[in-house]
Image (tube, coloured by chain):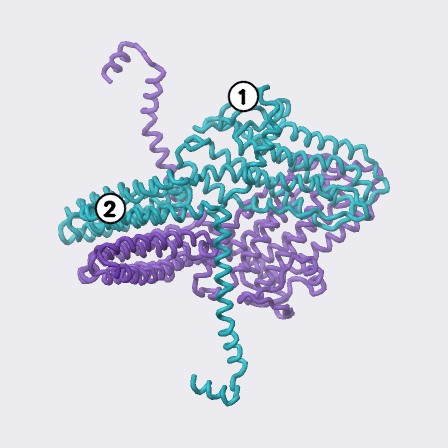
Chain colours: A cyan, B purple
């Protein structure tokens, strides 16, 4: 360093470029550091503001940990449990998840797996001890090897992986630990007992705190995710219906639609939906949801919504291509295209609101009817049209869009059927047909709608359609509620 | 039971229905049990046959566990490490994952987090001890609370969640355990040291076994997943090109295409791709992949392939609708539609093969060119067509399909650009332009192709196009290799 300083002092710059860059880097360091800290602070505040439940969750975990630490500080408990108190700390850290369902799933998996593996482990130890001093470690080693291999392989079964993955992991863990330490540690039974008690204390703390202190229910998140996904595609459809794509061009050029890309997140929502539905199954009844709420029907509805989003994705790529539509053709399809997209958008909005408020999805019925009528009108208009001097090449882009819109109307119909089934299964407030009876057979005929699946897996051949006159005027009220309900699910697990 | 038997003997059937059902259930029990066992056995064999690496993985985990158990059986080690040897067992069970990348990620996260948290924990203990007998537990409790809350919140940051989630978990765990037990256990330093050593032993065993014994590389899986996804959409396109949809109907009715729904799995491959890319980053160089292989470019390519799959999904719903296409219109579009789908399918096949064999994607060039020419031909044919007495309503379905095919050709072009970039970044054997130079500016003009992104995040404004004459005759060879390479990725992580 002194040599370099000397050189710099004498005005010599042997590797000027390198040093200058290094110096300017050092000079910029405090500023860069400050920028970075500001950025992290801003991100932190944003994360917290986006979903305050994250802050609450962090405090809950910290509280659970501090509570469990009492095991150590409080002498009486320490004397009883010894160093095993550590397992309670470990359990809290590992088990406490963001949603109640995930916490319950992990906590119960851990408790039962420990119990089972502990019992098996003690049994294995007794068995091995029959083989004498020499044989014992060999028998234990072979048993650990076999059970570990079998359990690890069982984790590849989709159904086990989905629900009991963590349990199997803890099973291998506890079994190996109990058998292996049984060979050395005296008081094996006491150790197993302590481990179980501490895991129950840790897991119990987590479960109680997660259920009774500002609970985050996976089921509720799934419920609002599906509703908001429906809203997102509804927004897109209403956007292009009310937008400028189908307007007659004033300056002879078709104007671009304002982008409304909220629907894009629907395309990849499958994993989130499935894991939330999986956690929701572990949750006890809460608020508007019973213990055996039909979570599977949410997955079905979600899949249909995603199907619709794929169509919209294609529609979007066609709408954004810069092609001039001949006015004469636009006049033919304009009205029915606007009605198709606007009305199917409105139908979806009504379905989303029906899910959110858990009221009957009846209000979607009229909009769906309108959009289907528009399809008919389009067909009639096209049949009547004579396009003798039409440029077929110029017509095609607009025709394609109309054609995809027709397909979307079919999709929306399927979604409405699925929401209707959901409303039946989950006992929404006033159960009523979403589509008029004469439409239904035709729908069922297409083979795309499954008959109502009851909770116990039996098919119900009867579809009850009750018409309730009392609630006929509630559309406006629904609209009001839909505006009050905050939009957008909190997709925390994926962040 | 005796009463019931008596009643039955006397021919009385008090609750005949119930008992009969119960009896037939009991009678069926052995059969049902046998069926269930057979089914599970069949499933097990199928799981193992589908991917034998699963069996090997299970054996590897069992071997690692048995090796680590030696810590206990071997007295010398036991005397040195005491009960802490358990941590080695725990580490093996928790860290050993299916792919090398996942194992490395967990092992390194666990080691560094333990080291850091252990050091911080010991520091916290010293700090707390300054506050005397009374103050110590309070200070420790406050420290645990603060650190646990902050760490838990940090797990909501997407970048931390993606790569260091497990590390943060272990950090909270170790810190709480060290500070809390420091208050009680003597020889805190020794405990921290033992814990670190055992974790290193357990983690080291896992990492060594997973790398040197039949390794499963996440990077290799990602590589073949992308290639096989490209293959799947290629199969669909070739299927409809060679299929009967565009054939002139012989009996006046359009025939249905044979379903080829392999592409459906591409729609939801995002999560798998992202997690494999994430694990691949942790992996050292192996086989054909260097340490800093451009995994990000695979994600880009995968996203474009998915985009194409969305278009195909829409195309599929249109192709399956039962509409009769007027022969006169079919004649106009037939040739170019067949060429578009067949040639873009072939281009994709060539791109898939180029990725699989890591050779230059040059052979796709001609097919892409052909499909683009077919788009031009379609335009010309439609411009020249006079459809004075045409039924516009009947034309639209076929026109829509043609229109979506044009969009798919654009998609395939983007995929080919992305694969070309990949070939440059990953030094595929002979690097050459996938599209001829005069096409490229037009592509870039659409704003859909990003300039080449170098590994360090800088943009490279120069695109080097080298033309190599030597390899011009290798198309057929590529085809041969593509047939030999087994198809379909092993999506084990998702099972």
Identify residue for label 2. Answer: A195
Residue A387 appears at what percent x and percent y?
83, 39
Quick one: B464 or A55, which is closer to the camera?
A55
Q: How many marks?
A: 2
Q: Is A248 left or right of B454, judged from the image as shown? A: right
The residue shown at (63%, 28%) is A365
Q: Is residue A79 visible?
A: yes
Are discs 1 and 2 both within one chain? yes
Residue at 34% from the left image edge and 49% from the top image edge: A93
Secondary structure type for disc 2: helix
Q: Residue B96 appears at what percent x and percent y?
A: 35, 55
Q: Depth-wise, is mark 1 or mark 2 nearer the camera?
A: 2
Q: Secondary structure at mark 1?
A: loop
| Gap between marks 1 and 2 measured at Cα | 53 Å
How would you rate the neighbour count of disc 1 (Cα within 10 Å): few for under 14, some for 14-19, many for 20 or more?
Answer: few
Give whichever of A368, B432 is nearer the camera. A368
x and y percentages locating residue B222 in the rendered image: 49, 56
* Occupied quadrant, residue A232: top right
Is any atom of residue B69 visible in this view?
no
Quarter-of-image position of residue B172: bottom left
Q: Chain of mark 2?
A: A
> Does label 1 or label 2 sit earlier along the sequence?
2
Q: Are marks 1 and 2 in contact (CB under 8 Å)?
A: no
In the drawing, what numbered circle is on residue A464? Answer: 1
Looking at this view, name the residue that lies furthest to the left: A132
Can you give x and y, in whole percent of width and height, for residue B379 in the image?
77, 50
The residue drawn where x is 57% and y is 29% is A361
């Amino acid at each position: 360093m002194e040599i370099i300083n000397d050189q710099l002092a004498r005005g010599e710059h042997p590797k000027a470029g390198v040093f200058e860059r290094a110096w300017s880097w050092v000079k910029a360091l405090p500023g860069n550091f400050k920028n970075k800290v500001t950025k992290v602070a801003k991100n932190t505040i944003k994360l917290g503001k986006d979903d305050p439940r994250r802050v609450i969750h962090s405090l809950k975990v910290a509280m659970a940990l501090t509570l469990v630490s009492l095991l150590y500080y409080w002498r009486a408990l320490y004397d009883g449990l010894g160093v095993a108190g550590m397992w309670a700390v470990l359990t809290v850290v590992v088990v406490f998840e963001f949603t109640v369902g995930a916490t319950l799933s992990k906590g119960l998996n851990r408790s039962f797996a420990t119990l089972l593996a502990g019992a098996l482990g003690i049994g294995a130890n007794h068995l091995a001890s029959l083989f004498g001093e020499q044989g014992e470690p060999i028998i234990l080693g072979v048993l650990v090897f076999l059970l570990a291999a079998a359990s690890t392989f069982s984790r590849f079964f989709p159904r086990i992986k989905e629900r009991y993955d963590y349990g199997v992991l803890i099973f291998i863990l506890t079994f190996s630990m109990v058998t292996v330490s049984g060979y050395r540690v005296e008081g094996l039974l006491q150790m197993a007992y302590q481990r179980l008690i501490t895991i129950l204390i840790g897991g119990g703390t987590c479960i109680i705190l997660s259920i009774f202190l500002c609970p985050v229910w996976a089921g509720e998140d799934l419920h609002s995710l599906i509703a908001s996904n429906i809203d997102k595609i509804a927004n897109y459809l209403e956007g292009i219906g009310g937008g400028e794509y189908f307007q007659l061009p004033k300056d002879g050029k078709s104007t671009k639609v304002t982008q409304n890309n909220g629907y894009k997140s629907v395309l990849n929502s499958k994993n989130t939906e499935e894991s939330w539905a999986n956690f929701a199954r572990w949750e006890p009844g809460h608020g508007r949801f019973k213990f055996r709420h039909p979570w599977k029907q949410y997955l079905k509805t979600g899949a249909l919504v995603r199907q619709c989003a794929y169509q919209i994705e294609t529609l979007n790529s066609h709408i954004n291509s810069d092609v001039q539509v001949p006015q004469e053709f636009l006049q033919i399809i304009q009205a029915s295209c606007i009605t198709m997209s606007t009305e199917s958008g409105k139908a979806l909005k009504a379905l989303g609101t029906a899910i959110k408020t858990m009221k009957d999805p009846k209000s979607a019925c009229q909009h769906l009817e309108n959009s289907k009528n528009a399809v008919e009108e389009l067909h009639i208009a096209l049949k009547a049209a004579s396009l003798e001097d039409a440029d077929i090449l110029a017509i095609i882009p607009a025709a394609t869009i109309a054609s995809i819109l027709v397909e979307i109307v079919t999709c929306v119909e399927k979604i409405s059927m699925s929401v209707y089934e959901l409303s039946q299964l989950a006992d929404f407030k006033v159960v009523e047909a979403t589509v008029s009876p004469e439409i239904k057979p035709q729908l069922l005929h297409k083979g795309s709608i499954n008959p109502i699946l009851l909770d116990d897996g039996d098919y119900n051949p009867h579809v009850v359609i009750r018409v309730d006159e009392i609630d006929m005027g509630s559309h406006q009220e629904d609209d009001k509620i839909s505006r009050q309900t905050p939009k957008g699910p909190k997709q925390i697990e994926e962040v």
